[in-house]
Amino acid sequence: MKLAVVLARFPRLSETFILRELEGLRELGCEVTVYSLSAPTPSEAELVGNHGFEVVRRAAWPTVPVAARSLSALRNLLDLFVSGEGAISMERLSDLRHVATALGWAPDMARRGIDWVHGHFAYVPSMVGLMCARILDRPFSFEAHAWDLWCTRDDALVAELLEEARFAAVCTDYGRDYLLARTPPALAGKTHRIYHGLELAKYPYADREPSERLEVVAVGRLVEKKGFTTLLRACRKLLDDEPTLDLHCSLIGEGPLRPELERLVASLVLSQQVTLTGALPHAEVIERLRGASLCVVPSVVAQDGDRDGLPNVILEAGALGVPLVATAVAAIPEFVQDRATGRLVPQGDPAALAEAILETWQQPQAAAMRAQAARRLVEEQFDLSANVRQLAALFVDNSRRQS
């Protein structure tokens, strides 16, 4: 199968799970061409490294006959530009270049003999993918993840995408339930939960070695939903309650909240204990996790409704045997089950977070048992090859139904 995959930006450091999925589809025989609405920054492209996929970004202007045929095929979707409600409809209303992009990409897809168009995220990329599929008269599908579900209020677009799609894959049960709550019940059968996965051989399990230092690692973009301000306040409480504690906390990632976090580190007098490393190559992130006493995922629901789905660092830490402390937000409890595969605490509660961190470190046998259970859960439900085969089967099964 020749597959066109439409993305907002590729490659993207915070979306390496998509890259892993595409690599898995390629290994199963899919010819994947990526259509990216924007380019990564040079530093981001360098951090992701060579991915080996052909990426199309520039869209050629269509000829007049092609444009005329295309606009006819797009009539129903174009109606959404003026009939929808919410943030995305405003973007579509003010940014009709997405239509021009589809008109330019569709002939390129035709030249390549694309069999199927697949969008990632239930907003603009999938909308552009649907337009291309309509122009080409090819099947369409999409995947929904996190921000696209929580923060877009454009139910008209989401319903249209699901109505037109052969199937929709959602990466958590929480996300699938959220999608179903805003779309017609008759479309529920088109949705499938398929977890992200890991190449397990690249994440060998290892028990933690005893250490006099409590080494905390947290990974993610420096944005509100990651809850790093709560983690910093938890670190301050740990030091206030345990003045002799040898604590170090690494925040790995980059983002718009960096200045605010730096000011908070200074005001909490944590400059000797906290390091903001910036974004790191994935291999270095894994090495930092290997050396950690535990991994903390202090996610919160942001003021605009944004929240994590199931952060991939949870899977990576769980696979490696790094004890987990996380908050009960969105789909995180689908992996972190309190006192079973990690510790789970309420969001935005520095005292509860500090208590769980200290308990996990001070009770290594219990932490090790939870880490072993987390590794088993990764093997059972988050094996990349098994989960990509589920996705590939949806393409195959729906192709057969078409024929």
Image (cartoon, helix red, strand yellow):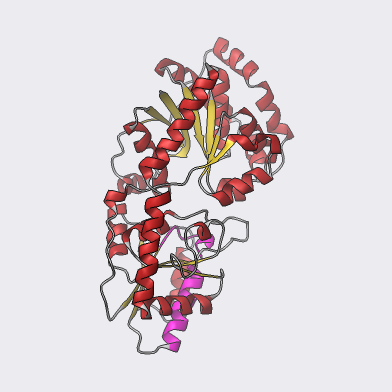
Q: Nearer the viewer, residue 354 or 222?
A: 354
Q: Which residues are magenta?
A: 219-241
Q: Residue drawn at (38%, 74%), measured in percent from left and top? A: 366
Above or below residue 390? Residue 399 is: above
Q: Is residue 294 left or right of residue 177?
A: left
Q: Position of residue 360 (x, y in %)?
A: 40, 75
Q: Nearer the viewer, residue 209 or 102?
A: 209
Q: Is residue 220 magenta?
A: yes
Q: Is residue 177 left or right of residue 172?
A: right
Q: Residue furthest top?
A: 65
By secondary structure, the bulk of the magenta-drawn segment is best described as: helix
Above or below residue 244? Residue 10 is: above
Above or below residue 207? Residue 157 is: above
Q: Position of residue 382 (x, y in %)?
A: 41, 49
Q: Would residue 246 be seen by someone viewing this image from the given angle?
A: yes
Q: Position of residue 180 (x, y in %)?
A: 65, 43
**Quadrant holding the N terminus:** top left
Q: Would residue 250 be seen by someone viewing this image from the given angle?
A: no
Q: Which quadrant of the structure image shows residue 213?
A: bottom left
Q: Nearer the viewer, residue 205 or 213?
A: 205
